[in-house]
Amino acid sequence: MRRRERTRRADRTATILAVILGGAGITHFLRPRGYDRIVPDALPPRLTTLASGVAELAIAAGLVVPAARRTSGWAAAALFAAVFPANLKMASDLLDHPRSSRTMRIVSVLRLPLQAPLVLWAVRVARHASKP
């Protein structure tokens, strides 16, 4: 594959990741209660929700800037790994809650292994970013 095409592909995938992170970051401010509920008990819910929203928005912005893309890709990978305990808590809470539907329970459990491809995607963005 030609270098120009690789660069275009890397830019496109970084932009898609930025849009996903930016959208998620915005929802932390528009609908914080849903995120507050899945924050592990050892952390302050609202502060953690807002801090993770700020982190997602900052990383999304960094992914759009070619000079910051490498660092932002690594930060995205770290963020995806860091939020895994919240996903575990959400699955556990839904499995334990008597009013959770079967579909909600299945989706929450099946969602857990999807975190790994997100981490790998972010690592790939970081590794393929042009060096500043």
Image (cartoon, helix red, strand yellow):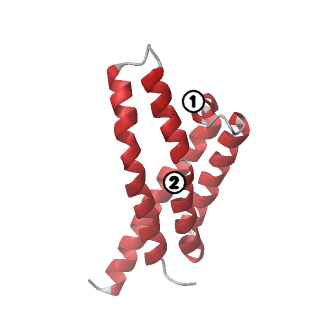
Which amino acid lies under the numbered mark 1 shown in the image of this protein? Gly
- Label 1, label 2: how far apart the Cα atoms are: 18 Å
Q: Position of residue 31 (x, y in %)?
A: 60, 31
Q: How many marks?
A: 2
Task: Tell me if 71 is positioned left or right of 6 in this view.
Answer: right
> Can you tell which mark lies on residue 80?
2
94 over 110 or under it: above or below? above
Q: Which image quadrant is residue 124 in?
A: bottom left
Taking the view exactly as shown, the residue that stands out farthest to the top is 99
What residue lies at 29% left-to-right and 86% top-to-bottom? 2
> Can you tell which mark lies on residue 34?
1
Tag in front: 1 or 2:
2
Name the quarter where the C terminus is drawn.
bottom right
Name the quarter where the N terminus is drawn.
bottom left
Task: Sort mark 1 into few (<14), some (14-19) or many (20+) by Cα contacts within 10 Å.
Answer: few
Which amino acid lies under the numbered mark 2 shown in the image of this protein? Phe
Q: Position of residue 63 (x, y in %)?
A: 54, 65
Taking depth in this image into account, of 132 and 74 the one nearest to the observer is 74
Task: Tell me if 62 is positioned left or right of 120 in this view.
Answer: right
| SS for dot 2 | helix
What residue lies at 55% left-to-right and 60% top-to-bottom? 78
Upstream in the sequence, badge 1 or badge 2?
A: 1
Task: Tell me if 71 is positioned left or right of 17 in this view.
Answer: right
Q: Position of residue 98 (x, y in %)?
A: 44, 14
Task: Sort mark 2 into few (<14), some (14-19) or many (20+) by Cα contacts within 10 Å.
Answer: some
41 over 60 or under it: above or below? above
